[in-house]
């Protein structure tokens, strides 16, 4: 889990793929943190990405750095606990301009049964299940 988190953070930006009906949607994200041994992301409940995840929680995250990339697949589960939201916002204080753990919009989600695949053009893929 730490290796996955470290790679995502080093990339800075990752792309999250969701499904909107029969149309894939991909957008950039920057938040990824570990809380209670789960990999979490953050968004707003008012956003289309949140609505898509609630309809179909299967997602894929992808990031690239120095000729290597990481894909993380799994189901995202919403965690409405104040502690989980506060942890995310405390670790990403710039988000506090738009989000607060006490509002009805802040949403944190964690990967359930995630599969991380590290790949490159020069090495065979390496898979980590978490």
Image (tube, rainbow, N blue to C red):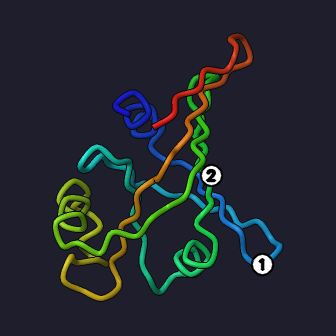
Q: Which residue lies furthest to the right in this view?
A: 22
**Horizontal and vertical percent position of residue 4:** 44, 33
Point 26% across, 63% down: residue? 94
Among the 4 quarters of the image, the one containing residue 124: top right
Number of callouts: 2
Q: Earlier in the sequence, mark 2 or mark 1?
A: 1
Q: Nearer the viewer, residue 123 or 56?
A: 56
3D distance between C-alphas at marks 2 and 1: 16 Å
Point 56% across, 58% down: residue? 28
How packed is label 2: few (under 14 Cα within 10 Å), some, or many (20 or more)?
Answer: some
Name the element at disc 2: strand
The residue labelled by disc 1 is: 21
Point 47% across, 87% down: residue? 46
Among the 4 quarters of the image, the one containing residue 22: bottom right
Please identify the quadrant where the C terminus is shown.
top left
**Horizontal and vertical percent position of residue 50:** 52, 76
Q: In this view, does 99 lie above or below 33?
A: below
Point 64% across, 22% down: residue? 67
Q: Is residue 55 above or below residue 104?
A: above
Among the 4 quarters of the image, the one containing residue 121: top right
Q: Which residue lies furthest to the front in this view?
A: 113
Instruction: Indicate which disc residue 60 carries.
Output: 2
Name the element at disc 1: loop
How packed is label 1: few (under 14 Cα within 10 Å), some, or many (20 or more)?
Answer: few
Instruction: Indicate which disc residue 8 carries.
Output: none
Please identify the quadrant where the N terminus is shown.
top left
Q: Look at the numbered discs 2 and 1 and tell me whether their residues touch, using CB distance below 8 Å.
A: no
**Horizontal and vertical percent position of residue 93:** 21, 61
Q: Is 54 left or right of 97, judged from the image as shown?
A: right
């Amino acid at each position: 889990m730490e290796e996955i988190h470290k790679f995502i953070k080093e990339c800075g930006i990752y792309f999250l793929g969701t499904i909107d009906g029969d149309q894939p949607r991909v957008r950039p994200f920057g938040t990824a943190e570990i809380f209670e041994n789960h990999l979490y992301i953050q968004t707003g409940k008012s956003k289309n990405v949140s609505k898509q995840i609630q309809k179909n929680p299967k997602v894929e995250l992808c990031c690239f750095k120095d000729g290597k990339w990481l894909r993380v697949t799994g189901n995202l589960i919403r965690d409405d606990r104040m502690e989980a939201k506060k942890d995310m916002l405390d670790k990403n204080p710039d988000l506090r301009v738009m989000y607060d753990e006490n509002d009805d919009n802040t949403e944190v989600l964690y990967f359930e049964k995630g599969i991380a695949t590290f790949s490159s053009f020069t090495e065979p893929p390496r898979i980590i299940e978490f």
